[in-house]
Image: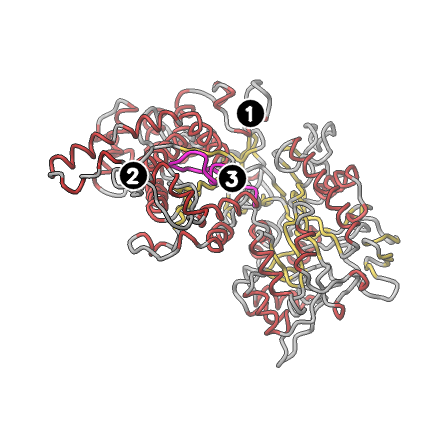
Amino acid sequence: MIVSGPSLPVDSAALMRLGTEQIRPELADLDTLSVDELVHVMSADLVRVPTAVEASQAAISAAVGGVVDRLERGGRLIYVGAGTAGRLGMLDAAEAGPTFNVREGQVVGVLAGGTDAFSVPVENAEDDRVRGAASVRDLGVASVDVVVGISASGRTPYVLSAIEQAKALGALTVGLACNAGTPLGELSDLPIEVAIGPEIIAGSTRLNAGTVQKVVLNIISTATMVRLGKTYGNLMVDVRPTNEKLRDRASRIVAEITGTTLEAASKTLDQSGWRPKVAAIMEMRGVSAEVAVEMLARHEGRLRPALEGDLAERPASERPPAARASGAGAGVAAPIRLGVERALIDGQLIDGDVEMANGVIIAVGLRGGDATSRRGIAIPGFIDGQVNGYAGVDILHADVASLLAMSNALARDGVVAYQPTLITSDFDATARAVRVIQEAMEIQSAQGAGGAGGARGARGARGEQGAPGAEILGIHLEGPFLSPRRAGTHPVEHLRVPDPELLDALLDLGKVTTMTIAPELDGAIPLIERCHERGVAVWLGHSAAQASEAEAGFDAGASAVTHLFNAMEPIFARQPGLAGAALARSDVTVQLIVDGVHVDDSMVRLAFSAARGRCVLVSDTIAAAGMGDVEVDLGDVPVVVRDGVARRADGTLAGSVGKLRDGLRRLARLHIAPLDALCSVTALPAALLGRSDLGGLAVGSRANVAILDNDLTLERVLIAGRDVDLA
């Protein structure tokens, strides 16, 4: 049929070319068919689904491999879609919990228009690119996550924007479309384009396209869970027995595995807390539930190796990444206990030891062995969000070798990951520094995720291969959009008024993860919003803002305050300023330099009391950290250190020489609650920096550990399970 008249808009013309939008001439009389004829036509048409899926097996396999890799590293599987596609993603995510007992939040479904759109469509939600990107940012997507965009057409704006944002945040992206050569396929790291062809009702992608999407999502999630050890053979051993039917199924599963009776299986399940894997080990090995849990933990929760043999017997291709990295087929190292009395787990101090193997935590809360010989507290290694320099290295002027050496020095003081900070300088100097930092990050990545630093070949404190250095997480640009009234050490001549083009130029330099901006500057709010759109965190600081101006900055997307109380207006009764506004808001993280110089002890106590659960320690160290009384540069500014205090020639404080570990000890002396103190250098900075793979000790997580005594004094550091030489 030829249509005359004005040409269609480009997007409309493109949509009309999609296979799923084509009109099938042979069905022109569809509305005249009888019920029997309609059912026959629709049933017969389904034969195209398995054929189309089979043709896409290679792409689906690649996606499953990527999902397994990320979930083994503690990441998440996130589905994003609109309309039917989004509802199918939510359905698959909802089914993962009861079927495979995945932890809450590990498989997530995101629907354009929100959860209410599941039952009542939200008009134009699929065209909302801003919300598409925001949906990914709001989840704190990181490099260990997989984001699967689902769109039958492969052109849905909400989904495309979400995938663009996920890629910017370093996540693996998968695009599932039902047409070939789609924008979604081109944009995604791993495209799955299942060309199902025209629908019975033209354009109604809830039919064969919807069926294809459901089938592919089923394959992705099910194959992933099988590879993660969520089944034993084809038995659903991680089922949650939450009702009578599922308890009967669990009993039959345990009976099938162990060869016992249904009655015995049910009794053992009851003793195990209705955990089929635990019950199977108890029944076959004759051990207690506690021992069975420990045996499972040794094998990353996989039942078969726990029942039938050691992990070392598995083929190299079937071992998790940590095991593969440990020795290319040389087997898996024997588990090692840390010998600690307590450990920080999920924000709580729990009694018991921690066990690791091949750089990964495999068990926590262990009570066996000689309890009297255990001492100390195991916590995740420290994370420092603001480091200007360290151990003689100034980041603005460093070369790659110096940065890697600095990462090793930080590791010796308990820091396992950090965000280098560049103070305000001219554009060319900043650009050069960003290139150097990125090169150092690439070297770390090549030597092994988690920050391989430059320590290969060194020897650890306990004679093992040298531990890697602290991981570089990204770049913090502290300026140039700062207040001249509160510039601190920043050279006023390099400060700039908010300029969108300059902002984009700075963000385009490389992996900028954070910017500090003064919100009261004319034009600052659009800059904060622009950073938010690009996935760059904004902290407010070096600011003369009044409370209302600070509130506007937070409402625009700023998430934290750079070194609370420093380089900002003081708090007055009727003028609380930036500091007062931040303390009063429950959604804002406040960062503190606790070196005994920058903030009075009483103000530290005030912050931890007013903003409990929101206080993060930063060191704000300069090159002089750990060097005594010296003269150094902070960027382009000469700094003199005397009696542990760094100042410019005019007396202005110029960064800190206090180490993060010393700040933690100071919190203990100030009687800050131990959990609040410990989380301020671990889980909270990890969350602020969007790194869900850091800041926690859990089975399966990387063994980045700091061991402290009861006064929170650092005694031992491990990165990727290897001891750091503290000498």
Quadrant containing the C terminus in the rendered view: top right
Which numbered disc flags the more N-terminal residue, 3 or 1?
3
Q: Which residue is mark 2?
A: 23
Disc 3 or disc 1, which is closer to the eye? Answer: 3
Q: Amino acid at mark 2?
A: Ile
| Relative image position of residue 628 (x, y in whole percent) | 84, 51
Q: Which residue is mark 1?
A: 324
In the rendered view, tell whether residue 317 sits above or below residue 605: above
Q: CA distance from mark 3 to mark 2?
A: 28 Å
Bin the neighbour count of mark 2 within 10 Å (Cα to Cα): few under 14, some 14-19, many 20 and up.
Answer: some
Bin the neighbour count of mark 3 within 10 Å (Cα to Cα): few under 14, some 14-19, many 20 and up.
Answer: some
Helix, strand or loop at mark 3: helix
In the rendered view, tell whether residue 633 sits above or below residue 303: below
Quadrant containing the N terminus in the rendered view: top left
Q: CA distance from mark 1 to mark 2?
A: 51 Å
Q: Nearer the viewer, residue 584 or 254?
A: 584
Residue 187, which numbered label? Answer: 3
Q: Is residue 121 magenta?
A: no
| Relative image position of residue 89 (x, y in whole percent) | 37, 43
Disc 1 or disc 2, which is closer to the eye? Answer: 2
* Residue 676 in which image quadrant: bottom right
- The magenta stretch is 169-187
Helix, strand or loop at mark 2: loop
| Relative image position of residue 170 (x, y in whole percent) | 57, 42
In the rendered view, tell whether residue 704 sits above or below residue 46: below
Q: Amino acid at mark 1?
A: Arg
